[in-house]
Amino acid sequence: MLDEITQRKVAVIGGGAAGMMAAATAAEYGAAVTLYERNDRFGKKLRITGKGRCNVTNDCNMEEFLANVPRNPRFLYAALSAFSTEDTKAHFEALGVPLKTERGRRVFPVSDKAADIVSAMERYCRDLGVNMVNRRVTGLSIEDGCARGVRVGQMTEEYDAVIVCTGGRSYPLTGSDGDGYRFAQQAGHTLIPLRPSLVPIVCAGNACSRMQGLSLKNVTLRMVDTKNGKTVYEEFGEMMFTHFGITGPLVLSASAHVPDLAPGRYEAQIDLKPALDEKTLHDRILSDFAKEINKNFENALDALLPRKMIPLVIEASGIDPYKKVHSITREERGALVQTLKCFRVNPTGFRPIDEAIITSGGVSVKEVSPKTMESKLVSGLYFAGEILDVDAYTGGYNLQIAFSTARLAGMHAAE
Ligand SMILES: Cc1cc2nc3c(=O)[nH]c(=O)nc-3n(C[C@H](O)[C@H](O)[C@H](O)COP(=O)(O)OP(=O)(O)OC[C@H]3O[C@@H](n4cnc5c(N)ncnc54)[C@H](O)[C@@H]3O)c2cc1C
């Protein structure tokens, strides 16, 4: 039994992925922990992760992991060493949530239910005696460069250490609407400007809105830097057209590779037939056209393209839609092949941060110890999770970052 007088009192602000991990860890290491969550439920965002299935981590090694972190990967080295992707898997299995690994080494609960992850985390906290409180923290109490407690309503509640796990600024209805950034600034921390990442992309013109609702499977999306013609992103998968532009898994991933997206800066190129090289595609078109020789061009593309796309592909190819198929020239077929292999849309910007999966930017990692997650400016103050200026691509990396940084913060806050 720990002596109550020597037992450290730790407050954790935010009952999401990082907060629950930090709270349970600090309790495991002997602290008396109170976890504050402003919502009436814990893990509200966690419940909607991975389309409700929760891609809890990625089954990869350190090097591969860090290659998927575009912002400040080196900062995570100690955290990932202390609590690795293997540890995350073992952790949830031990909490009674069997896991499975899918394409791209994405790890999910076998049940496909994010709620199972949340229940396991809540149970983990309660079993370790964490005091789980559904209240909003309104500020920090800092005296002489030390964290002394948290403000809740008009009251100051005293603690020996405070861990801020309030998340980012995206999907604010889940509770993460930016309080923590205010707390960090109050403590004197520098905030790296916030920016949406893993976010839908707005495109110029009305091409996308004309194809609104159309989902493309098995296509390749390329993002090409118009300054130097370099491809900065290329991936095979699924995407969708909307009234404002493009979205879907490929597009969200692409957005993280083009942080400086501005009108004209990048071109999005869609290979609609990535499985066929140009010659094979040309032959395929020829054989399709042989069955439709007396039809107008516009009526001869049904086997090749989804209906909503046909008028736009025709416009891009420059071929007269009313031309009879038998009189289409070899050059025109070549133009059609080019259009199918490289259908262009012009991104002009991102959708707002509210619609982003991830907030990029946040508490500058220069002012946080990577070995403990403690503030270098205020002793006893810790940060973990999305509030930090680290973010990753899709694939379970972001939750792993939350768990690893929280684990370190919890261990050291309890010391
Ligand atoms: C739709 C969607 C799907 C996603 N899918 C995945 C996925 O499958 N895999 C993956 O790795 N990542 C995924 N992510 C990203 C992942 O959810 C986040 O990286 C992760 O939740 C960050 O954890 P966190 O604990 O830092 O923040 P959060 O999970 O946002 O938790 C912060 C908590 O703090 C609380 N809070 C805020 N302010 C206060 C306050 N003043 N007082 C008390 N409580 C407060 C909030 O209510 C919230 O519960 C997804 C994100 C979204 C939006």
Image: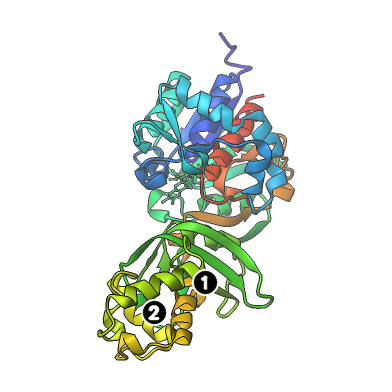
Of 395 and 362, the residue lying toward us: 395
Q: In the rendered image of this protein, does residue 410 appear above or below residue 235?
A: above
Q: Amino acid at mark 2?
A: Val
Q: What residue lies at 51% left-to-right and 54% top-to-bottom? A: 358
Q: Which residue is mark 1?
A: 268
Q: Which residue sits at x=60%, y=71%? A: 224
* Side of 218 relative to 143 (left or right): left
- The image position of residue 31, as x and y in percent, is 58, 22
How far across and how far down the image is residue 325, in percent? 32, 85
Residue 252 drawn above or below residue 270 = above
> In terms of secondary structure, where does tag 1 sit?
strand
Helix or strand or loop: what does disc 2 sit on? helix
Does residue 137 appear in this view?
A: no
Which residue is more in the foreground, 143 or 383? 383
Q: Amino acid at mark 1?
A: Ala
Tell me the residue that label 2 is attached to.
313
Residue 95 in which image quadrant: top left
Quarter of the figure with residue 404: top right
Image quadrant holding the N terminus, namely top right
Q: Where residue 142 appears, x then y in whole percent?
A: 64, 42
